[in-house]
Image: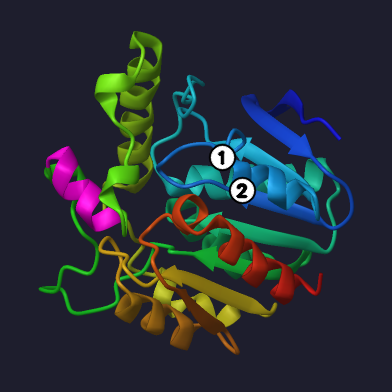
Amino acid sequence: MPASMSTITLQGVALRVTRQGEGTPLLLLHGGDGPQDRLPFFQSLAAWFDVIAPTHPGFGGSIIPEHFDGLDDLVYLYLDLLDALDLRDVVLLGFSMGGWAAAEIAVRNTSRLAKLILVDAVGIKAGTRETRDIADIFAMPAPAVAKLTFHDPSLAPNPATMTDEQLTVLAADRIAHALYTWDPYMHNPKLRHRLHRIDVPTLLIWGASDGVVPVAYAEVYRALIPGARLVVIPDAGHLPHVEQPDLLLDHILSFAGK
């Protein structure tokens, strides 16, 4: 089944949504690397699920609403999307900042959710005030970010091979990423005190070589969510959907009972 692309207006916000597949609904919230609908991993997911993949406003050439100033705006936008599409028994899957948004959704309302999957998610303060839990990727040169993000840094996007249009989108994505995650940096200090509210089965999936948020960070996340499990994917960094898509899919399918 080919993907359908539409724009859904929610409380005045135009939200671009890609949808593909049949069966169990899966709401996919992408990370700061942008929408996944052109990746092979997305097609593999759509062979098993009814995948609903919104593009966060500001990413992929879309517009950031004037009143948006943080991740909370995404959280309530996607709560509205779940209601507008009347989705039920949803598998909520979030990557990095999308995982943070997914966790924030789940602490507010799980009535439409069946399961929660967080992949290399940010969102909590795992250590003390003096501890840097999450690498400051906005302050680093691209090669340093690539080394932290990828098990194999040669897989990092190369701006030298991009068109002017692609570079423009990449720059806008970076601005949107910063808007949603900058202050406080990549986390909500209150989230760790709310994760006990999550009452659906939860799986955390982490790249063993993630240098942005290491596996030790994932262990803290797991301990704060009742009954949550953690699986670690070898030979993958912060983006296992790029480096180990087949193994990532296997874990998702097993957890979802496919």
Type of the residue with mark 1:
Gln
CB contact under 8 Å: marks 2 and 1 = yes
What secondary structure is marked by label 1? loop
Q: Taking the image as drawn, is residue 110 in sight?
A: no
Residue 103 is labelled as: none
Q: Taking the image as drawn, is residue 115 in sight?
A: yes
Of residues 142 and 189, the one nearer the viewer is 142
- Quadrant in the picture for residue 192: bottom left
Measured from the top left, where is residue 175 in percent x and y?
31, 30
Measured from the top left, where is residue 213 in percent x and y?
30, 66
Going 36% across and 39% down the picture, which residue do you hit? 177
Going 47% across and 50% down the picture, which residue do you hit? 242
Residue 143 is inside the magenta segment: yes
Residue 151 is inside the magenta segment: no
Residue 36 is labelled as: 1
Of residues 94 and 245, the one nearer the viewer is 245
Q: What stretch is highlighted in magenta?
A: 141-149
Q: In this view, does 29 lie to the left or right of 233?
A: right
Measured from the top left, where is residue 119 in percent x and y?
50, 63
Q: In which quarter of the image is the N terminus?
A: top right
- Work out whether mark 2 precedes mark 1 in sequence or the reverse, and give the earlier one: 1
CA gap, disc 2 and disc 1:
8 Å
Going 81% across and 55% down the picture, which residue do you hit? 48
185 w.r.t. 78: above or below: below
Type of the residue with mark 2:
Phe
Measured from the top left, where is residue 185 in percent x and y?
25, 54
Label 2: which residue?
41
Of residues 131 and 23, the one nearer the viewer is 23
- Quadrant in the picture for residue 21: top right
